[in-house]
Amino acid sequence: MKVKRLVAAIFLVLAMMVTITGCGGGDDAAKDTGADKEKIFVFARSGDASGLDPINVTDGESLYVTQQIFDTLLEYKEDSTEVQAGLATDWESTKDGREWTLKLREGVKFHDGTPFNAEAVKFNFDRWRDENNPYHHGDFSYYTYMFGGFPGIIEDVVVVDEYTVKFVLTQPQAPFLANLAMATFGISSPEAIKKHGEDYFKNPVGTGPFKFVKWEKDQQVVVEKNPEYWGEKAKVDKVVFRTIPDNSARLMELQAGTIDGMIGLNPDDVETVKNDPNLQLLLRPSMNVGYLAMNTEKEYLKEQKIRQAINYAVNKQALIDAFYAGLAKPAKNPLPPSLWGYNDEVKGYEYDPAKAKALLAEAGYPDGFETTLWAMPVARPYMPQPKEIAQAIQQDLAKVGITTKIVTYDWQTYIEKGENGEHDLYLFGWTGDNGDPDNFLYVLLDKSNTVKGSAGNVAFYMNDRVSSLLVEAQKESDQSKRDKLYKDAQVLINEDAPWVPLVHSTPPIAARKSISGWVPHATGTECS
Amino acid sequence: MTDTTSLQLKANGPQPRTNEKESRGLWADALKRIIRSRISLAGLIIVAVFLLVALFAPLIAPYDPIKDSDLVKRLEAPSDEHIMGRDSQGRDVFSRLVYGARISVKIGVISVGFALVLGVTLGAVAGYYGKWLDGLIMRLMDILLAFPSVLLAIAITAVLGPELRNAMIAIGIVYTPHFARIVRSTVLSVKATEYIEAARAVGCSDLRIIMRHVLPNCIAPIIVQSTLSVGTAILDAAALSFLGLGAQPPEPEWGAMLSDGKSYLQKAPHVMIFPGLAIMFVVLGFNLLGDGLRDALDPRLKQ
C-alpha cells in the first residue's frame, strides 16, 4: 500500500471478527439492547477515499473502505501475512511455478446478484492487465507495481470450468499468492463494471461483508451489512467512514462519543487516550516505513554525496522522541525489521551534521543550496504530524546549510505530483500489503516503477544492479536464496541513498471502550 | 484645505493662518483630542508599543525565533527562561511573537499601501473624469466588494500560490475598493467647487489639479480608513496564514503560530493563547485608534 493504505483495514475487523460487546455506536449500550435498533459503527480518519475501485487506488483511506466491500481470492490470516482461503478455497501450482490453478468458492453472489465464478475472475484480471480492454479505465498502479506492467507476468487467465481458474505466468513469482490477497485485488462484479464504466469507482460492487450505500465526498462513506455474505456475517448493520482532517478535532469527537473509533492519533495524545476511562488504545503491529525520498533526477539531489549528506543531517531519534511518543524505531533500511530479508548489517547513516557538511563541501557545495521539502497534508500512520516533522527536518537541514521551502498540496494532488516527479525532497511512506520484501523493495525502489504518472519509486532511483537483484528474487522460490538477494540489494540501496529512511512506526489507534473485536492488522487494511 | 477644515480651524484657534500652518494645527489638534479620549489613547499606546516591539525586535527577543529550537523541550510550559513557553518545535514563543510583530507591520504597511495607491488612483480617476470611466471603475470595485473579503483573498492567494507576499497582494486587492469609494466621493464633491474651476481657468493641468487641489481634501478620511485597514489586514493575513495560504514555516507569523498550536490546544494551550492574544490586542489597538482618529478629524463631532 501506498502510503495510505495502511489503515484501511480496520473495520472490518471490527465488524466481522469481533465478538462484539457493543460494536455499535458510541454509547451503544442503548443501541444494543433493542434488538431492532440499527448498530452503526462510525470510524474516522484524516482524509477521504480517493476512489472506491480497489484496483485503482493505492491509499489506505480508500482501501479501508473497499476492504469492506470486496473480497480477494486469498486472504491474510488475522495475525500475520500468511494466506488463507478467500474467494478461492484451494490452490496448487505446477512444479515450475508457472501455472496456478485455483478452486473457487461456490454459491457466492456479488451485491448486485451477479454470480461469482471463474468467468468473473477472468473478467477482472483481463480488465486489469490488458490496456486495450474496454473497461481498463484508470491507471491500475498496483497491478503494475506487483506484476510488472501490462500485462506483466500474468500471461493468461484460463477458465477451466465454472469454479476453476488457471493463471499462466511468464515466469514464476514467489509472492504470487501473497499478492493475490492484497486488498487492491478485490474482485468486482463484471455486470457493475459494464454498467458504470468510468464511474465504477463511485459505484463499487463486490462480494464482501458490506454493501456500498453512499459516498459524500470529503464527508463520509456509508456501507451496510450484506446479509447474504458467504463468511461470518458482519456484527454491525452499518459502518460510516467519516473524514475529519484534524487529529485533535477527531479525538475530541471520539471523546464526545460521536465517533466510535479513529486512526491518526497524535502521539502527543496517546496519554490522553490511556487516561480516559471511556477510551482504549490499540496498537497496530509495525510493518511500515516513513521516509524522505530524494528525487534523483533533480539538480543537487542527483549527486550521491549530497544525498548521503542529507542522510547524515537528519536527526531521526529526535523526530521519534518528539513526534511519535516513542512509538517508532529509527529506520536505516527501506524494509521494516519485522520482515524477513531485513539486513541488520547495513549500518545506515547516524546523525552527524559535521560529516554532512564535509560531504556537501566535497560535492562542491560548502555553503549548501536551496531546494523544496514536500510535506503531506494529512496524518499518516507512519507520519502522524507531517507538517511538524517537515519543520524539524527543515531545521536539521538548515544546520548544514541546506535551505528548504516547505511545500504542500491537498492529498490527491500531493500524490499525483509525486508520481509525476515534480518534487525535490518528498516525505512519504509505505505500509506493507503482503508481508513480502518484494512489496517494499520492488514497488518503492525498482527502476521499472519510475514511470511518470504512476511511479511507486518516487525517488526515481534507477540502479540496474539493484533491479536485477530484485527481479531475480521475484523469480526465485527458495526463501533463503531470496533472503540473500534482498539483503544484497539493501547494501546497494544504502550506499546510493535515494531515501532518508526515517522511521518504522507502531501506529496507535483509539476507540471507545465499548468497541471490541477490532484487531488491527499489520497491513493496515484489516478487515477482517 | 477644504472649507470644512478651515471652518474647523477657525473654531479652534482664533487667528487665520497660512495653509501650511493650518494643517499643522489640524494634526496637533487631532492629537490633543486623541489623547484626551481614554479609549483612543489606549489604541494609540497599543499601536505605539506594537511598532516599537517590531522596530527593536532583535533587542527584545531573548532567543532566535527560528534557529533556537530544541525538540526535546517542545511544548514546555511558560517558565522564567521562556515566559510564554515553547512551541511544538521547542522554540521560544515570546521571541517568535516579537519577531512576528515585524511581519505584521510589514503586512499592514505593504498590503494597505498597495490598496491605498491603487484605490486612490482609481477613485480619483473615476471621480474626476466621470462618465463611462467612472462607471467602469466603480462597477469593478462593486464586484470586488460583493465578495466576502476573506473568501476573495483566499481565491487570489490560491491562484498566486501560498506565500506571504501573495497574501499581502491579495489583501491589498481586497481593500482597494474601500479606498476608491472614499476618494471618489470626495472628489465628486470637490470637483464642482469654485476654486477648482479657478484652477482650471488659470490653466492647471488635470494632474496638478488632482494632486494639489483635490486629493488633499481626502487626507483625513484616508488616514482613518488606513488605520482601520491595517488592523483588519493583520487579521486577514493571520487568517490566511492559519489556513496555510500565507506565511510558510518556519516564519513566526502570528496566524501561522496559531495554526501550529491548534493541535495542542488541550495539552499545551500557551502555544495558541499568546499569538491569539497578540493578534487580538493589535487589531483592537488599530480599531480604537482608527475610531479615535475619525472623531478627532471630523469637524462636525467637535461642536
Image: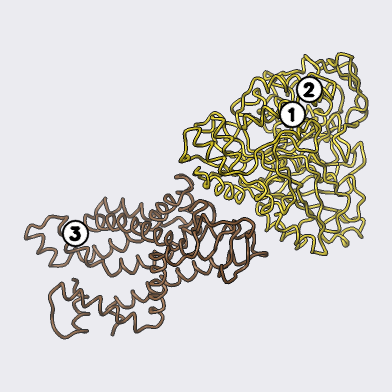
Chain colours: A yellow, B brown
The residue positioned 68% from the left and 33% from the top of the image is A199
- What amino acid is found at the position of numbered circle 2 in the picture? Phe
Residue A193 is marked as 1
Decide: is A331 above or below A236. Answer: above
x then y, percent, for residue A324: 70, 51
C-alpha span from label 2 to label 3? 78 Å
Decide: is A241 above or below A162. Answer: below
The residue positioned 20% from the left and 63% from the top of the image is B214
Image label count: 3
Res. A149 image quadrant: top right
Decide: is A91 above or below B155. Answer: above
What chain letter is assigned to the residue under label 1? A
Q: Are marks 1 and 2 on the same chain?
A: yes
Residue A123 is marked as 2
C-alpha span from label 1 to label 2? 10 Å
C-alpha span from label 1 to label 3? 70 Å
Res. B178 image quadrant: bottom left
The crowd level at tag 3 (other Cα within 10 Å; few <14, some 14-19, many 20+) is some
What chain letter is assigned to the residue under label 3? B
Mark 1 or 2, closer to the camera? 2
B47 vs A514, left or right, is left
- What amino acid is found at the position of numbered circle 1 in the picture? Ile
- What amino acid is found at the position of numbered circle 3 in the picture? Ile
Residue A100 is marked as none
x then y, percent, for residue A118: 86, 22
Whether the residues at callouts 1 and 2 have beta carbons within 8 Å, the answer is yes
Q: Secondary structure at mark 1?
A: helix
Camera-nearest residue between A38 and B79: B79
B152 vs A122, left or right, is left
Q: Which residue is mark 3?
A: B210
